[in-house]
Image: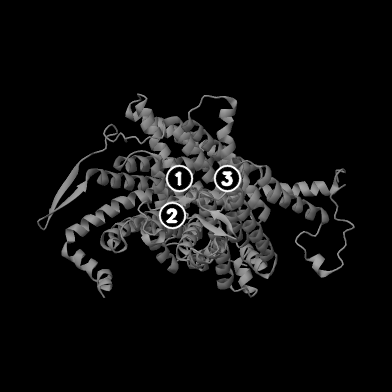
């Protein structure tokens, strides 16, 4: 009886009792959700355009952040290091397309998936070999990211927001808007959508698949860089961050592999759900449930929509 | 010249149904078995047995399990590590509760616990498929890992949070614990692995295996032809988890000696997945080849710089080895996406016509 009370009544009483605290929890969840959404966005971009489930997206985030910090440590000014990192991400996109995707064209999905895991291993080894394995600190101030807090009073109770979270949200919104414009208004964007719809049809009207793949991987690399900066501003830059890729996977199945709005809304749902679940119900199970809670939230949605919230309806023919 | 199918006529149904219908194959497998059961424990050093042979055959068993699910039934799973963990913890609890029981029996029994858990986490496969399912199986991986950490009963409230293998005997020999000799542990593992592989090969070529392959090739068509999805898919999950569970129990009891929850992390799932991809999806022999390759590669890579006298630090070697493994995996996928088993099939074709080119 007590347990039922703890599960079904107590958390809601707590929520109603301290609404400002709930608001704060939701805001924190949204801030984490934005980052999940950004990682998922990188996955979706690549999956849409090339059908590759890019497991290396998480490691690309770390790799980009590490390159940025590493170059700054070598004496480059922050913005030069940023440009240099963008260059490295382009180089990565070109070499992945040349050395991995092109020879593996037309292989089954699982083979391409395994290839991206191979890429993950390679990038971890390479990154640690070049920059060393010890954790580093992200250069937030040099990049002009704000620190500190905003303080609001709501009904006499303080609500504290990290400036960094606000900045991350704004940057994420700008980036998603830019991607939306890029996809819908430009020539390359239209070519990308054509490739996403049908590879063969796109080829037959003269769209170069190889070129599109480079662009998509480069775009995913930029998204990874932004994610890396935002995420590592909150903690250190190290390969322990690769775990965030695994955190972003439920976002993908929740939102659908092919939907950009799905990635964003899925990210926010997972972010908020995780925080609320951990704070109000987590203590019943002894804490630490955030490692799998997101997966169960996503699974619960999947039971009703097997293709994700915004995924394309799967039509199967015999 | 030596490898000919011609002239070997079958005069009974039993002969026609044999696993190895060709005389040369039977001879070959006999040679391999003799080498594995007699020559390796007799000639191999303790180091070779404990750090190469035992893990390779145990991981091969896990690979057989995953291959049943992914290679034959077509359900991609990333929860292998956790299912192995269930087997290991189940065996640990069983031997705590029944200290007098035959440990070999307990190791096999622990597979049933793993199978039960596998069926539960196989339920989403009825609704979703492909990569969606792969991510759903990650739920099993993380949830079970969390259970191994948080549920104290599983590791007898040991303050270190690890399970330590007690000394246990079977048939008058010390099989587990620090006092067991490598030879005994190797032979016990090998016996279980060979028996279970033989069972798997019979399962796969029978009615059940054919149903799995129908589901893999096209599940809707299979359903229309009267295959019951619920039963077939869940059976695949159960059998696969059973194999993984036994492999996990063997891993801890015959090799690690003690294990923390991190021994069953997602890394292990990927390792086994690599083994079946490099070895060959849908091939039992591929499991063994893949396990030997994936396990042997880092060992070899670690010894090359030492042997060549390069003065690299241990961490640098580790990082370079990881880079090379990643690159080699991609390279292998490019040159032979069907895995090492395919190379063997090609070699067999060539042997059939040798010494003539056609």
The chain that hosts pointer 1 is A
At numbered mark 2, what does the secondary structure look like: helix, strand or loop?
Answer: strand
Q: Is residue B338 left or right of residue B180?
A: right
Pick out the residue farthest to the front. B172
> Residue B331 placed where, x, y %?
61, 40
Query: Which numbered dot is residue A57?
Result: 1
Q: Find out whether the residues at labels 2 and 1 contact each other: C-beta distance under 8 Å.
A: no
Q: Nearer the viewer, mark 2 or mark 1?
A: 2
Query: Spatial distance from mark 2 to mark 1, Cα to Cα?
Result: 35 Å
Query: Spatial distance from mark 2 to mark 3, Cα to Cα?
Result: 20 Å
| Location of mark 3 (residue) | B50
Residue B44 occupies quadrant: top right
Which residue is more in the foreground, A27 or B135? B135
Which residue is more in the foreground, B175 or B148? B175
> Residue B182 placed where, x, y %?
58, 47
Q: Mark 3 or mark 2, which is nearer the start of the sequence?
A: 3
| Location of mark 2 (residue) | B163
Badge 3: how crowded within 10 Å, few (<14), some, or many (20+)? many
> Residue B276 placed where, x, y %?
60, 52
At numbered mark 1, what does the secondary structure look like: helix, strand or loop?
Answer: helix
């Amino acid at each position: 009886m007590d347990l039922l009370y703890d599960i079904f009544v107590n958390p809601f009483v707590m929520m109603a009792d301290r609404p400002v605290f709930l608001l704060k929890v939701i805001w924190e969840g949204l801030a984490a959700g934005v980052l999940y959404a950004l990682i998922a966005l990188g996955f979706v971009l690549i999956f849409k355009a090339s059908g590759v489930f890019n497991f290396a997206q998480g490691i690309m985030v770390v790799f980009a952040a590490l390159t940025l910090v590493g170059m700054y440590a070598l004496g480059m000014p922050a913005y030069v290091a940023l440009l240099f990192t963008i260059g490295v991400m382009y180089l990565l996109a070109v070499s992945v397309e040349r050395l991995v995707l092109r020879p593996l064209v037309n292989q089954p999905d699982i083979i391409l998936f395994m290839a991206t895991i191979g890429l993950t291993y390679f990038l971890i080894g390479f990154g640690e070999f070049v920059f060393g394995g010890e954790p580093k600190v992200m250069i937030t101030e040099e990049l002009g990211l704000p620190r500190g807090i905003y303080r609001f009073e709501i009904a006499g109770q303080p609500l504290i927001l990290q400036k960094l979270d606000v900045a991350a949200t704004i940057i994420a919104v700008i980036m998603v808007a830019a991607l939306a414009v890029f996809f819908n208004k430009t020539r390359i964007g239209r070519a990308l959508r054509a490739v996403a719809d049908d590879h063969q049809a796109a080829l037959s009207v003269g769209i170069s698949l190889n070129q599109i793949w480079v662009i998509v991987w480069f775009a995913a690399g930029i998204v990874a860089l932004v994610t890396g900066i935002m995420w590592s501003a909150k903690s250190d830059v190290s390969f322990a961050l690769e775990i965030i890729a695994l955190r972003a996977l439920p976002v993908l199945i929740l939102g659908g592999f092919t939907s950009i709005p799905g990635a964003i809304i899925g990210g926010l749902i997972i972010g908020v759900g995780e925080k609320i679940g951990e704070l109000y119900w987590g203590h019943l199970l002894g804490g630490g449930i955030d490692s799998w809670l997101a997966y169960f939230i996503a699974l619960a949605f999947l039971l009703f929509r097997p293709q994700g919230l915004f995924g394309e309806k799967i039509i199967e023919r015999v | 010249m030596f490898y000919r199918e011609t002239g070997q006529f079958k005069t009974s149904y039993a002969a026609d149904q044999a696993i190895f219908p060709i005389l040369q194959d039977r001879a070959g497998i006999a040679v391999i078995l003799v080498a594995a059961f007699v020559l390796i424990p007799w000639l191999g050093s303790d180091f070779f047995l404990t750090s190469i042979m035992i893990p390779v055959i145990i991981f091969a068993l896990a690979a057989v399990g995953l291959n049943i699910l992914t290679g034959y039934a077509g359900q991609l799973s990333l929860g292998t590590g956790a299912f192995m963990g269930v087997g290991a913890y189940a065996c640990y609890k069983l031997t705590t509760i029944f200290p007098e029981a035959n440990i070999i029996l307990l190791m096999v029994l622990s597979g049933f616990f793993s199978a039960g858990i596998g069926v539960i986490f196989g339920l989403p496969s009825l609704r979703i498929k492909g990569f969606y399912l792969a991510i759903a199986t990650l739920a099993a991986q993380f949830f079970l890992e969390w259970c191994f950490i948080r549920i104290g009963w599983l590791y007898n409230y040991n303050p270190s949070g690890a399970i330590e293998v007690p000394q246990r005997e079977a048939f008058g020999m010390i099989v587990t614990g620090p006092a067991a000799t490598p030879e005994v542990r190797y032979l016990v593992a090998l016996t279980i692995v060979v028996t279970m592989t033989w069972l798997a090969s019979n399962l796969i070529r029978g009615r059940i295996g054919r149903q799995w392959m129908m589901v893999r090739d096209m599940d809707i068509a299979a359903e229309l032809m009267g295959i019951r999805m619920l039963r077939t898919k869940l059976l695949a999950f159960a059998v696969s988890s059973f194999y993984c569970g036994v492999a996990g129990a063997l891993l801890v009891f015959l090799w690690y000696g003690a294990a923390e929850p991190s021994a069953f992390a997602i890394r292990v799932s990927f390792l086994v997945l690599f083994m079946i991809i490099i070895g060959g999806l849908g091939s039992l022999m591929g499991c063994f080849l893949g396990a030997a390759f994936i396990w042997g590669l880092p060992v070899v890579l670690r010894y090359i710089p030492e042997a060549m006298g390069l003065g690299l630090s241990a961490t640098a070697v580790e990082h370079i080895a990881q880079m090379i493994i990643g690159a080699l995996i991609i390279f292998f996928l490019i040159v032979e996406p069907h895995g090492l088993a395919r190379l063997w099939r090609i070699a067999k074709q060539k042997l059939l016509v040798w010494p003539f080119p056609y």
